[in-house]
Image (tube, rainbow, N blue to C red):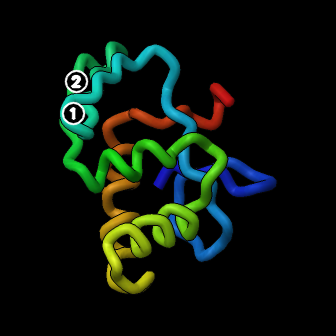
């Protein structure tokens, strides 16, 4: 996953505080009915996020870690942390794979 550790930047899976984001500069982001549609001109790809992925995107500012995002969604949906953590991480991995988060070299 593209994350920023508080002292280091990397793409990996580790159980440490992980800041998610920030988004790449230059994306075209449009919100329709609470869901984001994002175009990345660098990759010439567009993605349409569902409601949950859009909530993750809103929190992917580089100021929230994965646990913050999981906690916010767990509270919103009335679920336990463990019940949604894997799905949140998978969504962040997908957003990273789409090139939507700034790379270490650009931060």
Q: Where residue 68 sits in the image (x, y, percent)?
A: 57, 65
* Label 2 Cα neighbours within 10 Å, binned few <14 / some 14-19 / many ≥20: few
Determine the CA span between mark 2 and mark 1: 7 Å
**Please, what secondary structure does the residue beneath circle 2 have?**
strand
Mark 2 or mark 1, whichever is nearer to me = 1
Q: What residue is at 34 percent from the left and 23 percent from the top?
A: 29
Quadrant in which the C terminus is drawn: top right
Q: What residue is at 50 percent from the left and 62 percent from the top?
A: 69
Tell whether 39 sits left or right of 12. left
Is the residue 41 above or below the residue 24 in the image?
above
Query: Which residue is identified by label 1?
Result: 47
Furthest residue toward right: 7
Q: Do the residues labelled 2 and 1 touch (CB within 8 Å)?
A: yes
Tell whether 70 sits left or right of 98. right
Q: What residue is at 60 percent from the left and 76 percent from the top?
A: 15
Q: Quadrant of residue 48?
A: top left
* Label 1 Cα neighbours within 10 Å, binned few <14 / some 14-19 / many ≥20: some
Q: How many labels does the image show?
A: 2
Q: Where residue 98 sits in the image (x, y, percent)?
A: 32, 37
Give the camera-side residue of 30 and 7: 30
Tell whether 32 sits left or right of 69. left
Query: Which residue is identified by label 2?
Result: 45
**Please, what secondary structure does the residue beneath circle 1 have?**
strand
Q: Where residue 89 sits in the image (x, y, percent)?
A: 40, 64
Q: Where residue 6 sits in the image (x, y, percent)?
A: 76, 55
Q: In which quarter of the image is residue 81?
A: bottom left
Is the residue 39 above or below the residue 67 in the image?
above
Tell whether 44 sits left or right of 18. left
Residue 33's tag is: none
Is the residue 59 above or below the residue 12 in the image?
above
């Amino acid at each position: 996953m593209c994350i920023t550790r508080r002292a280091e930047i990397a793409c990996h899976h580790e159980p440490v505080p992980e800041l998610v984001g920030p988004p790449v500069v230059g994306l075209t982001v449009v919100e329709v009915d609470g869901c984001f549609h994002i175009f990345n001109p660098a990759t010439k790809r567009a993605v349409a996020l569902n409601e949950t992925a859009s909530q993750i995107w809103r929190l992917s500012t580089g100021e929230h870690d994965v646990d913050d995002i999981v906690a916010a969604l767990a509270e919103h949906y009335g679920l336990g942390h463990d019940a949604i953590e894997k799905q949140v991480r998978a969504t962040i991995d997908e957003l990273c794979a789409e090139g939507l988060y700034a790379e270490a070299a650009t931060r």
